[in-house]
Amino acid sequence: MAKTDIDYAGRPVDKEGRKPTLSVFMIMLGFTFFSASMWTGQQLASGLTWSGFLLSLLLGGLILSAYTGSLGYIGAESGLSLDMLARKSFGSKGSYLPSAMITITQIGWFGVGLAMFAMPVAKEFLGLEITPDHMSWQGYALIAVAGILMTASAYFGIKSLTVISYIAVPAVAILGTVAVVMAVKRGDATLVEQFSRGMKDMSVIAGAGLVVGSFVSGGTTTPNFSRFAKNGRVGLITTVVAFFLGNSLMLLFGAISSIYAGGSDIFEVMLNLGMFYVAVLVLGLNIWTTNDNALYSTGLGLSNITGLSKKKMVLVSGLVGIVGAAWLYWNFTKWLNILNCTLPPVGIILIIGYFLDRKSYADSSSPLRTVNWWAVGGVVAGAVVANLFRWGFPSINGMAVAAALFLAGRLVQGKNA
């Protein structure tokens, strides 16, 4: 008898595969616990007052939650992963485009995440000097050990991701909050006073755009995890709450770290408070919860493209991320931010395609076209617009263009039918 695929790489999640609501919530919340989001918090703190910061969090958080919540609902109701949803809206071979885009960005962030953990730990614990041109073997060894552990959790699938999330989410949330409160109490001014210092030249709209952009690319992979929720309503609620709370918390940690400790994340705050080992634990768990989810998505994406098993593709992706981690950290982060703008157009096409023709998604026997060129063109055009036109919300600009082309294609195809 063939082994049961607990990750449902090539089929909808059935009733037996659905998870308790708390487990899905923990996975989604842990996914948003990403140290790179703290960098965005630092940018917000440098350009906004306290009231402007809160308004940006609210506006950007609501937009991000609406986008990810829609994908969360679709994934849970249909039981389909992002790649299987893409087969419906982009075509059987057209789906290779969103799968490849997800794979590149998520392997990239996986590698960057490994370096974000290993490099500061190597500096503080081993006293190593690390530059873009040089890092001793101990630094690479730390990257390798962390990468192997994170790859293993993604390899063993959704059950392993659940266990990691149950450990990491409360630890990061509680210890991080305690450290931030301690830092504020040691400061010489209130939050309002600290935020008022310096040049405040960022608008609330620009700040909200940064909030949306901080995790909109990762949020596009939401169906990969929400499909394990009990139903669409549970998928929607858990996703919205998790993304709003988790992303806001990371941005807040980054902002307060910046204005009170001069650093970019909670790791540096804890170091300044003499909490080295706690800092390493929080940093490691924080990155782990996002990295294993990212690698899990790359496994599904590559499986869709190659037809090979998700587990094998996770191993390949993990190896690439480990080997390239240091290079990715120093050379590829700006490119990853550009690539982030390419994923929201994918998400909006998945959303529109599903709600316009949801009955076909429940019918596995319905025929698939090979390539929907209107969907492919929408993603390409949306990505160009999102990267070149920076007014308003770049990611929303890209989604608007992608949606317009995709809908135009449906009208044309309808007329030709």
Image (tube, rainbow, N blue to C red):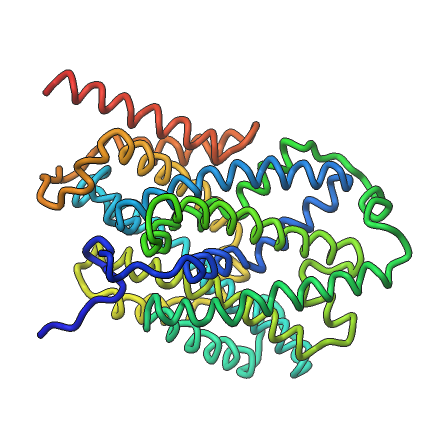
> Observer-nearest residue: 201 or 78?
78
Q: In terms of image quadrants, where is residue 399?
A: top left
Give the side of residue 296 with respect to residue 388, left or right: left
Q: Residue lying at the far right in this picture: please name it.
A: 188
Residue 294 pos. (x, y %): 41, 60
* Residue at horizontal 47 percent and vertical 51 percent from the top: 336
- Report the quarter where the C terminus lies: top left
> Observer-nearest residue: 85 or 96?
85
Give the side of residue 80 with respect to residue 254, left or right: left
* Residue at horizontal 40 percent and vertical 39 percent from the top: 70
Residue 251 pos. (x, y %): 64, 51
* Residue at horizontal 71 percent and vertical 52 percent from the top: 255
Count numbered badges in the picture: 0
Q: In terms of image quadrants, where is residue 195?
A: top right
Up-down: is 127 above or below 170? below
Is residue 107 something that shows in the picture?
no
Residue 11 pos. (x, y %): 19, 55
Up-down: is 241 above or below 166? above
> Observer-nearest residue: 44 or 82?
82
Residue 245 pos. (x, y %): 58, 50
- Report the quarter where the N terminus lies: bottom left
Is residue 19 something that shows in the picture?
yes
* Residue at horizontal 39 percent and vertical 32 percent from the top: 382
Give the side of residue 239 with respect to residue 362, left or right: right
